[in-house]
Image: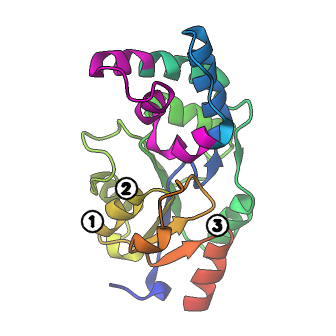
Amino acid sequence: MPSPSQVRAVLFDLDGTLADTAPDMSDSLNELLMRHGRQTLDYQEVRKHTSRGGLALIKLGYNGTLDDDETLQLRDEFLQIYARRLHDKTRLFPGVLALLDHLDEAGLPWGIVTNKPGWLTEPLVEKLQLTPRASCTISGDSLPERKPRPEPLSKAADLLHVDPAECLYMGDDPRDIQAGKAASMKTAVAAYGYIQDHQDPHAWGADVVLEAALELKDWLSLHG
């Protein structure tokens, strides 16, 4: 593996890493549940599951009582609701802008690799004013494979013209670390993201666990 001083590009997950999307995801799920006469869920409970995506949130809201077809149908309805709320409350996590400024100033290209579908990723990244700054954006439907498969990360490295071994991928879910390691990248856990109670980010095998986004700047500087 390369030393940290050889990191030439940084890739980020979106939900729970760059952007705090949980408030809008939670509101959207509860709107769906109310529409169907279900009990709404506490925000903190929804927040922990946000990085797992729409299917996981539907299963959470319905306690896993639906069959696959019902789950998919409600997932699609949920996503339509979410598309209307996409940026009502979503903001970048504290320190993210300063981190991205540092990467730009240091000449390190950065990009986004998310499992969120492109029709939601692209407008959200635009609303967050990251579109002109990101060197690449790979969505969940950009390729046939999604995380935890390594292909999206490998594609991002190719677009950035950087060897995967010289990239670092940062995310808040075990799938992110699994995908990054499978792509031969260094990995960082965004422990400020949507970590579930039973999860121990220190057990995921990442190169570093970060309690705040801006800690990545310090880590790169210390090891550079």
Badge 3 amino acid:
Asp
- Distance of label 3 from label 2 (alpha carbons): 27 Å
Q: Is residue 17 visible?
A: yes
Residue located 32% across and 54% down the image: 155
Q: Is residue 39 above or below residue 54?
A: above
Q: Is residue 125 visible?
A: no
Badge 1 amino acid:
Ala
- Distance of label 1 from label 2 (alpha carbons): 10 Å
Task: Say which residue label 1 marks.
Answer: 182
What label sits on residue 104 in the rendered view?
3
Image quadrant where one finds the C terminus: bottom right
Which portion, as a residue range, is magenta? 45-74
Residue 143 rendering spot, x and y as whole percentages: 29, 41
**Disc count in the image?**
3
Q: Earlier in the sequence, mark 1 or mark 3?
A: 3
Task: Say which residue label 2 marks.
Answer: 175
